[in-house]
Image (cartoon, rainbow, N blue to C red):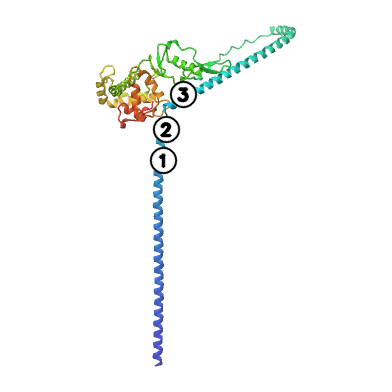
Amino acid sequence: MSGRLRFLERKALSIRRYSSDKSSLDISRNGRTRRSKMKTAVVSVALLFLFCISVTAFNTESQLIDNEVELQRAREDVNRVTPNLRDVNEEDDELDVDDDTDDQDDNAEDDETDNENAETSDSEEETEETDETEEADAAENTEEDSDVAVEEEEEEDDETEDPPEPDVDVIQTNPCDLFPCKPGKECYLTKTNKPKCRCIVECDSSETDFRVCGTDNNTYTSECELWRTKCIMKQNKAKGVQHLRLDYYGDCKEILPCGEHELSEYPTRMRSWIKNIYLQMYDEAEDMGGLNEKQRFHGRKLVANRDRLQTYEEHHIDLMSREFQKFYPLYKYPIHWKFGILDVNPTDKYLSKRELEPMRAPLVPLEHCTDTFFSTADENKDHLISLYEWAEALGLQEDDIDSTLTTV
């Protein structure tokens, strides 16, 4: 009986131990499972956080790139629009400032000249006094010097004298050659051989056949005479002289108003005129003012078909208009070329009133619609004609406008 009881006690003890070990094992397993799940959750959250950060950084970088591109475009627009902000009134103001500066320079030059003359007179007086003193001293030493000279001459007669070295011609340049003056002025040399500018004393008589009309509606015998008159009037401080400029070539006359129909035909005549000028310069040698090699290359097709083209003087406006439509590609380069010839001060793809003057002045007496045409071509009324405004006014399509063709 006692043995049976001990067996049962050991059995119960083993069962309790087994149950305890099993529960401990289950607890440890559950702990490890929870820890594994927590680690997985933490890693997932970290990966999600990193992914969000990378997406945010990518979007930020893309936005920065877009902002930089927009900023660059804005800068280009500002650089392109900045020249348009100039105004004719500003040009007149600049002329006034330049004229005032010239007057100040002229006054300063006159003061310098007066000072130089005063210093020269003082130095001449001092020189005269010194010369008188030296003459007195020389008179006292004349007899002694004469005796010494006789003895030296007797000694030199026995010796052979070396021939004198020939004078070397020194090429001297005129300082005025490198001292440019504004229109209406000429360079002269002061007593100290310094170049200065002054109003032209007398214009070349050979230029009197080229009469011009000024903006004051007065006819001048030459362009030189016009600028000389302006210079003299400026010295006399005449009112309104800063606005005096060349209006057009020839005697002053009444310019008739331009009608709407005449204005519509003007681009056709202008295109034909530009084409003819190009062909004439093509026939001239480059050293004689003709086209260079690059300009000849771009216009080679126009020259090859010159016999098939018509001239402004010989055909009606309707025929020239149809010719432009038929030979449209041939007109593309001459229109760009003429713009590049005018766009020189500065070369910014915009034509100011001053840059248009070489083309406008000869045309006004022949074509009374010239000023109206240029005013109409300036669509944004900024007193500047851009390359696009120029090309569109002469009939070119926007896709055919190429700024590289204006480089001369």
- Residue lying farthest to the bottom in this orientation: 1
Q: Is residue 298 visible?
A: no
Label 3 SS: helix
Mark 1: give few (<14), some (14-19) or many (20+) Cα within 10 Å: few
Is residue 30 shown above or below 392?
below
Spot occupied by residue 104 in the image (x, y as percentages of width and height): 53, 22
Q: Mark 2 points at which residue?
A: 82
Label 1 SS: helix
Mark 3: give few (<14), some (14-19) or many (20+) Cα within 10 Å: some
Mark 2: give few (<14), some (14-19) or many (20+) Cα within 10 Å: few
Cα–Cα gap, marks 3 and 2: 20 Å
Q: How many discs mark residues in the rendered view?
A: 3
Query: Along the horizontal axis of the image, is 179 left or right of 383?
Result: right
- Which of the marked residues, 3 or 2, is nearer the chain's N terminus? 2
Foreground tag (3 vs 1): 3
Which quadrant of the rendered structure holds the C terminus? top left
Where residue 95 is drawn, which disc sits there?
3
Q: Residue at x 71, y 11 (%)?
A: 133
Tell me where residue 192 sits by quadrant: top right
Q: Name the residue under label 1.
A: 71
Label 2 SS: helix
Spot occupied by residue 285 in the image (x, y as percentages of width and height): 37, 18
Q: What residue type is labelled 3?
A: Leu
Is residue 44 shown above or below 235?
below
Spot occupied by residue 178 in the image (x, y as percentages of width and height): 51, 20
Q: Is residue 247 visible?
A: yes
Q: Which amino acid does label 2 sit on?
A: Thr
Tell me where residue 337 sits by quadrant: top left
Q: Residue at x 27, y 24 (%)?
A: 324
- Which of the marked residues, 2 or 1, is nearer the chain's N terminus? 1
